[in-house]
Image (cartoon, rainbow, N blue to C red):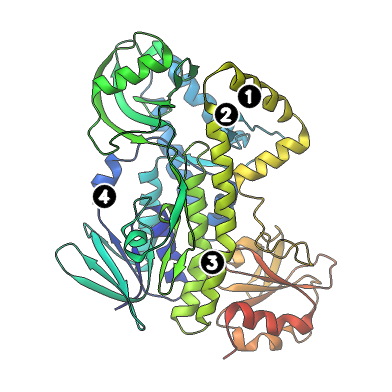
Amino acid sequence: MADVIIVGGGPVGLLLACELKLGGADPLVLEAATGEERRTRSLGLRSLNARTVQSLALRGLVEPVAEAQWAMLGEFAGDREPAEADVVALMVELLQEGLIRGHFSGLPLLDESGKAEYLMLKQHKLETVLAERAAAMGVRIRQGCAVVDVAQDESAAVATLAGGRVERAAYLVGCDGGRSVVRKRSGFAFDGTPPTMTGRTAVAELAAPGAVSSALRGPGGLVNRSLVPGEVATIEFDGGPDDRDAPMTAEELEGSLRRVTGQDVVVKRLETGIRYSDNTRHAETYRKGRVLLAGDAAHVHSPIGGQGLNLGLQDAVNLGWKLALVVRGLAPDSLLDTYTAERHPVAARVLRNTRAQVALMRPGPQVEALREVLGEVLELPDAKRHFGRMVEGTDVDYAPGAPHPQVGRFAPRLEATADDGARPLAELLRDGRGLVLDLSGGPDDGLGGAVAGHRDRVRVAHAATGDAGVLLVRPDGYVAWAGGRDGIGDALTTWFGPPR
């Protein structure tokens, strides 16, 4: 019997599995599709914002993801017409220079004040990197295992698979997407707003590729030629798709392109296509007893702005270390309540800003005027900083109003010295333990003794910042507590359970 069943083997489920394994738990991943099925559905590019890149750096995952990105972009440039290859080359240059910070409803958030942390790649390539890491750690991943029912009792959560097989675990996490079986079968409320638009992304051959701009706001909506060779996308504000799952035809895509652009576009061949909408819904809570939700199972919204994947990956790094401590019996079950308390407000803000971005995408002279005004506002340094932090995910604060300004925030970047030498703070968190950070940089002064009962869950490090205080940094990189040495014992018990 596994400690945790993870339903869904996409990026969120795979990263959660890695976090659980790192924390000493035994996860089992159940994925309905096969790897090939997931690859064929991987249309478009996914952006990883600054906070997600910082989180991946805590686990040494930035390097393999960046390698996959550069290899992918190299393939794209070699498979394009000269003019289109220039667009790919420009994107590569912007990424290399660290100028890309994303966009807000298509309005770029370029900033030369500092090198941005931003990665971009197809989803199945990210999944490959995470699956390889999970396999290397010994995580069990079963593909072709569709979960059709979920139940729980006082001792376990139960997943019933198609065919009748049953799997039991202490906890179960639904990472199975916007139409989550786990959420539906477990009775989570999922309220929100219905769709107002239909998005289509397809791999297709156009009779005159140059007739469709790489990015165009047309009279009937939006059209975009992706960096991915052969991919084209449209958005129409028509109330949402009638049938998201019906096979897309060349005629359907052609009709959409003509309505959006006002031109006689001809689609010669369609290889594959998907539909999406701005259906926006949010689970009332992320936990019901032994069943939890993460990623799109907990929140869905428009993909405009690319924040959904980042939101789900951040769910995983927030939940993983907490759930690992609980299933190992090191921390009380109540620690899991902090997951909803911290992540629900973050998702609510993302849902708000994606609704705003959809509104700013609509055609019409009034919206065009509003976009022009907002474009002027975004040239103001404070506004650029505010919107940039919002889309980068670096404005997250898990403890608003805390007496110490760093509590609830991502830990500062600095070099620290532990028992194995001086290293960047991010590297000191790679073993999945928390960190008691003495900012005075001086000798131990009894700090090691104060954390002796938690040595299996935290380590001690020193950084010479001139501050006499102590920070307790969680495994996900956020500061849980700050204060004097006398209070560290209570803080450790609050976040990491009682001492041994």
Q: CA distance from mark 3 to mark 1?
A: 36 Å
If you read the primary sequence from the N terminus, does the residue marked by circle 3 or circle 1 appear first? 3
As drawn, the label of residue 339 is 3
If you read the primary sequence from the N terminus, does the residue marked by circle 4 or circle 3 appear first? 4
| Callout 2 amino acid | Leu
Residue 334: where, in percent of width, then height?
A: 54, 78
Q: Nearer the viewer, residue 476 or 322?
A: 322
Q: Which residue is mark 2?
A: 360
| Callout 1 amino acid | Arg
Residue 403: where, in percent of width, then height?
A: 79, 67
Q: Which residue is mark 4?
A: 35
- From the image, state whether disc 4 or disc 3 is nearer to you: 3
As drawn, the label of residue 371 is 1
Residue 463: where, in percent of width, then height?
A: 75, 68
Q: Secondary structure at mark 3?
A: helix
If you read the primary sequence from the N terminus, does the residue marked by circle 2 or circle 4 appear first? 4
